[in-house]
Image (cartoon, helix red, strand yellow):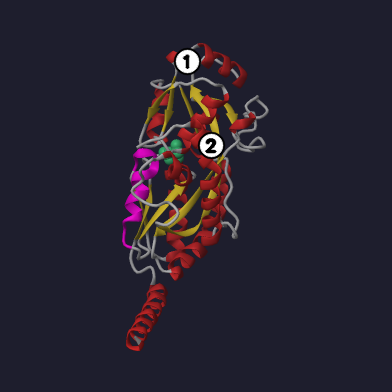
Amino acid sequence: MLKLFTSLAATAAIALISGSAFAQGYPERSITMVVPFAAGGPTDTVTRLVAESMSKDLGQQIIVENVGGAGGTLGASQVAKADPDGYTLLLHHIGMATSATLYRKLPYDTLNAFEYVGLVTDVPMTIVAKKDFEPTDLKGLVEYVKANADKITLANAGIGAASHLCGMLFMSEIKTPLTTVPYKGTGPAMTDLLGGQVDLMCDQTTNTTKQIKGGTIKAYGVTSAKRLDALPDVPTVAEAGLPGMQVGIWHGIYAPKGTPAEVTQKLSGSLQKALKDPDIIARFAELGTVPSTDAEATPAGLKSKLESEVTRWKPVIEAAGQYAD
Ligand code: ASP
């Protein structure tokens, strides 16, 4: 027994020493950061900005890999199964929390399959439509959608995506179901909205601000509590009559379960530096969002956010009774 205990203690000590020795030299090669949505969309945009700045700080390149599909759960699943060595990371948003309830069967256990690096940003959503969509304001949009529900299509990035969540909130607020069109990300969905192949979408400002400002799509409301400096002419959903649609799409960086704490701490420190990079602050402002604080950009900050958001959305999703297999 004593022998067993001694050998277990020795193994633990070696693991500890090699964990910190490993972390000291980390990173020694490039890191892959998985985005669980298609290239060109809002999550991709945020990830590429942050990855570029963190790469400079870490002295190794962070390569962004898009693994879109099934509302972000395919990419999350790939990272949950990856080696916990700090060389595979995931940047995911609120969908990490909602998919825990939305999917009857997930290939990973949301609250136990990952280590945490930190929160990145909390992005407002916008209700947008193709350029020539008839209604001119949110009140008119609601009337028009109710009267033409069978003809209107609503794009999203699959069940569990932020665009799906926001679309569900919209349909539930106006008590009108619509035909939804799933894409691998709202990057390709935006291409179809611009081309007029789909009518409506609710998507993060990080994907819509440029088009709204350029007049290539129409905006009806932002889901933030206050109007945004980047889009001063777009009313809040509450101002425009849909207060139940207030929602922020928080994004966080995760690592597979078992990644050494020294590694996630190092990455968290690098994330905090990136979020103070003047270029990131300026780009985020143009895109209608702000960087997380130092306290939020920590493993503890992201862990508590994920846990509270799983609890928050569970009853809402159960009440809506919409699940995916
Ligand atoms: N974040 C988007 C969404 O949840 C998808 C994307 O990034 O393409 O709808």
Instruction: In the displayed orientation, state which residue is furthest to the front.
Output: 1
Residue at x 55% of width, y 30% of height: 213
- Residue 316 disc label: 2
Q: Amino acid at mark 2?
A: Val
Q: Quadrant of residue 138?
A: top right
**Vertical order, 184 against 77 (above or below):** above
Mark 1 sits on what residue? 149
Quarter of the rendered image showing ligand 1: top left
Q: Is residue 96 visible?
A: yes
Residue at (55%, 58%) from the top-left corner? Answer: 297
Q: Which residue does the image show at 50% across and 31% down from the upper left? A: 320
Residue 305 screen position, x and y as percent: 55, 52
Q: Quarter of the image holding residue 58? A: bottom left
Q: What residue range appears in magenta?
A: 68-83
Closest to the observer, 126 or 194: 126
State the image coordinates of residue 80 (x, y, percent, origin top left): 35, 55
Q: Of circles 2 and 1, which is in front?
A: 2
Which amino acid type is shown beneath numbered disc 1?
Ala
Q: Nearer the viewer, residue 121 or 280?
A: 121
